[in-house]
Image (cartoon, rainbow, N blue to C red):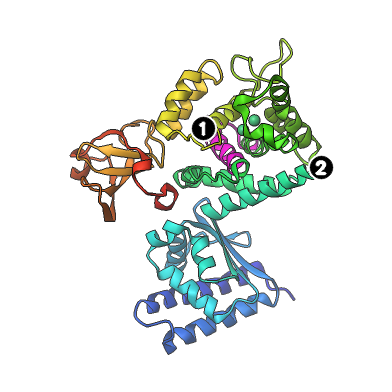
Amino acid sequence: MPESKGIAKEKLEQVLIGMIASVRNRGLYPADHPVIRNQVQRLISDFENFFLTRDKVSLAIVEEVLVFEGEPFYQPNIAVREFQRRIEERGVSAVEFYKGLNEEEFTGWIDFLVEDANRVQEKSASVYLREKKIEHIRLRDVREVYNRALDTISDALNEARLGRIPSADKAKEVVKDLSQYIISDRPALLALTLLKSYDNYLFNHSVNVSVLSLSLADALKVPKDDLHNIGLAGLFHDIGKTLTDKAIILKPHNLTPEEWEEMKKHPIKSAELVSKMKGVSELCVRLVYEHHINYDRKGYPELEAGRQIHPYSKIITISDCYDAITTLRPYQKPFPAWEAMKIMESLSGRVIDPVYFREFVRMLGIYPVGSLVRLDTGEVGVVIETHPETPLQPKIKVLFEVSGKRLKEPMEIDLASKEKEATTRNLVAPADPLLYDFDPSGII
Ligand SMILES: [Fe+2]
Ligand SMILES: [Fe+2]
């Protein structure tokens, strides 16, 4: 007879209590000490009992509550609370233990829970586990979701290139996960949009437009269902480019009139492809179709007189512009985020909607997450969080001292706070990232 859900949850609670006991002991003993090994072996056999009736044990944090197989831990005991806190601190929102989990992997997992949370976050929890070769424990964290989005769009673009209609199922799933992170950890997700891959421009661009659009849509408080449509439209908006000659895609500045006509067809091609995908709404198709029409309707394709541009299409247009400006292309050097904002300002009222643009600036800040900034002390830091109400006083991580030497231990300062380190420092100007060797995504 299958055990009831309540019993399974109670058993899992015992496992979590044991896990946290091991974590505490791991602070006292080395990994191969009998105390640790015995505990790990016992926990493995507990998991094996679970695996008699299921292939995996999944735990997820849903609206701040730890949930096991749909059953929330409403009044968690101390160990369950500590488990939740430890995974949360490491940027993890879900964990799955798979059948086949072995002692070595589980010892690595205990080490993961003991390891300094900031150090884990620097490379992301999922990368940490991959490097330790832990295969039977999978995590959902912001980088895993972003990478999954990249894989999903790369598969879809390849399918389209082969003349097939890609499935939207995985894309819908990944957009749902991205939108959750937009709500729970927006700075971390936005920081990842700064990762620009020159080789895979279209993959990163598609994911970034999806993330930025979700973020702007959320700031504009659009209903949740619409949010998913907007995210999906962002992901697929340029899929039609796979059907355009690559030579044209790579040199938009010197296009012949014929080539330009060809280029202008990509929103129609994208919309056609998306309309043939199963389970994709009319709204999503429309947003894809309209992403280059522009605020003044002077873009493409031409819209019949009297037909309105959907307000959400303007969200995609803004995100598309911003990501294009901040990305290195064969014909363009990337502009730092603050400079991109100035360029966007000049497009406001023509290409992009001024009201939405104002909200976009509020959302990203004048110095968006990942911007390098100089302080009046001469120090240089990177913006790690923005405050819509005080855009000139973001939270920063100071990375370089006055001499330009990199600090061994970066210093986090919220310029908006009343503390002394904050009140004695002011942000004075953007700093040129080319002068400093750093990868913002690994720092935030
Ligand atoms: Fe486009
Ligand atoms: Fe685009």
> Nearest the camera: 158 or 428?
158
Q: Are marks 1 and 2 in contact (CB under 8 Å)?
A: no
Q: Is residue 424 left or right of residue 183?
A: left
Residue tagged 1: 332
**Of callouts 1 and 2, the N-terminal one:** 2
Q: Position of residue 406 (x, y in %)?
A: 28, 52
Q: Secondary structure at mark 1?
A: loop
Vertical placement of 355 versus 134: above or below?
above
Residue 192 counted in the magenta span: no
Q: Position of residue 6 (x, y in %)?
A: 62, 68
> Nearest the camera: 11 or 94?
94
Q: Amino acid at mark 1?
A: Gln
Residue tagged 2: 163
Q: Is residue 252 left or right of residue 425?
A: right
Which residue does the image show at 60% across and 71% down from the upper left? 136
Q: Amino acid at mark 2?
A: Gly
Quadrant of the image containing the N terminus: bottom right
Tell me the magenta residue range.
204-226
Vertical placement of 124 versus 300: above or below?
below
Which residue does the image show at 79% across and 40% down from the upper left? 277
Residue 286: quadrant of the picture:
top right
* Residue 416 in sight in this render: no
Crowding near the residue tagged with mark 1, few <14, some 14–19, many ≥20 C-alpha atoms within 10 Å = few
Vertical placement of 36 versus 302: above or below?
below
Q: Nearer the viewer, mark 1 or mark 2?
A: 1
Q: Secondary structure at mark 2?
A: loop
Q: Is residue 438 left or right of residue 293?
A: left
